[in-house]
Amino acid sequence: MTETVLILGGTREAATLARRLVDAHPDWRVVTSLAGRTAEPAPIAGEIRTGGFGGIAGLADFLRRERITRMIDATHPYARQISANAAEAAALAGVKLDVHTRPPWDRQPGDDWREVASEADAAAAIPPGARVFLALGSQHLAPFEARRDVHFIVRMIDPPASPLPLASHTIVTGKPGPAAEEERVLRDHAITCIVCRNSGGDGAYGKIEAARTIGIPVIMIARPA
Ligand code: NAP
């Protein structure tokens, strides 16, 4: 049976899935939805649509209008709002929903992880005077504003549209790389601590391996329930 599939994307796994579905089912219509946060997203097989749907009602309307037969939530494990909206909209529109969530990373021998529940807890857990590699999106920086004793090295895919709310910081533009590249970034900036999320997957794991090699702690923000 031919299907019209909507993939909620924004992750490498979503792009891989789109490629796989397009190759395996040339008669299916495969549409990947992106939030539009990244100026130049990597190429994706099939169709792409960009931007928010306008909440649950907007997504349910889209499902009906485009006659979507199956929705796959392959968004990032910390993208809570869109996943919650997808569950509600699928029920409203009577569309099948599959959820593809990456498993989290497991702590390995030599890892010094300090697990915290929130960004605010992560900010409080940073050792005084640290040089911190902050691997979070620009919309998650406000809780770190009060740590005026800390120098932040903030990595972003695109340069920020407005000044960051951090007193002392350096911006490094680029994507996560393999462990050797991440180790170079950590050493070049004399980083003493990393703050990140337990995203899982291979793409962002290089910094975790590099932290283990260098022997610096990782303040790990737990996954949302
Ligand atoms: P979020 O807080 O869960 O979503 C906020 C709003 O952005 C949603 O209500 C929706 O707007 C829109 N949105 C999010 N994902 C969308 C998608 N795939 N297609 C269309 N609209 C989308 O999401 P977020 O944490 O800001 O993440 C945004 C996107 O970046 C996600 O697609 C995610 O997979 C990707 N991403 C996130 C992270 C992260 O750390 N959170 C990391 C890497 C990639 P409407 O309500 O108007 O529909």
Image (cartoon, rainbow, N blue to C red):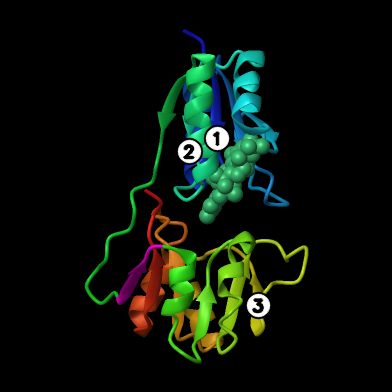
The image shows residue 71, relative to residue 198, as above or below, that is above
Residue sticking out furthest to the right: 162
Q: Which mark is residue 166?
A: 3
SS for dot 2: loop
Amino acid found under the numbered disc labelled 3 = Leu
Q: Residues within 10 Å of mark 1 (few under 14, many from 20)?
A: many
* Residue labelled with disc 1: 8
* Residue labelled with disc 2: 74
Q: Observer-nearest residue: 104 or 4?
A: 104
User: Is 79 covered by the magenta stretch?
Assistant: no
Residue range in magenta is 112-117
- Measured in 3D between alpha carbons, the distance from the residue under mark 2 to the one under mark 1, in whole angstroms, is 6 Å
Q: Residue at x 60, y 13 (%)?
A: 67
Q: Residue at x 45, y 77 (%)?
A: 124
SS for dot 3: loop
Amino acid found under the numbered disc labelled 2 = Ala
Which-is-in-front pick, marks 1 and 3?
3
Question: Do the residues under discs 2 and 1 have CB atoms within 8 angstroms?
Answer: yes
The image shows residue 171, relative to residue 1, as above or below, that is below
Ligand 1 placement by image quarter:
top right
| Badge 1 or badge 3: first in the primary sequence | 1
SS for dot 1: strand
- Cβ(mark 1) to ligand 1 < 8 Å? yes
Q: Residues within 10 Å of mark 2 (few under 14, many from 20)?
A: many
Q: Position of residue 118 (x, y in %)?
A: 44, 63
Amino acid found under the numbered disc labelled 1 = Leu
Q: Position of residue 165 (x, y in %)?
A: 68, 73
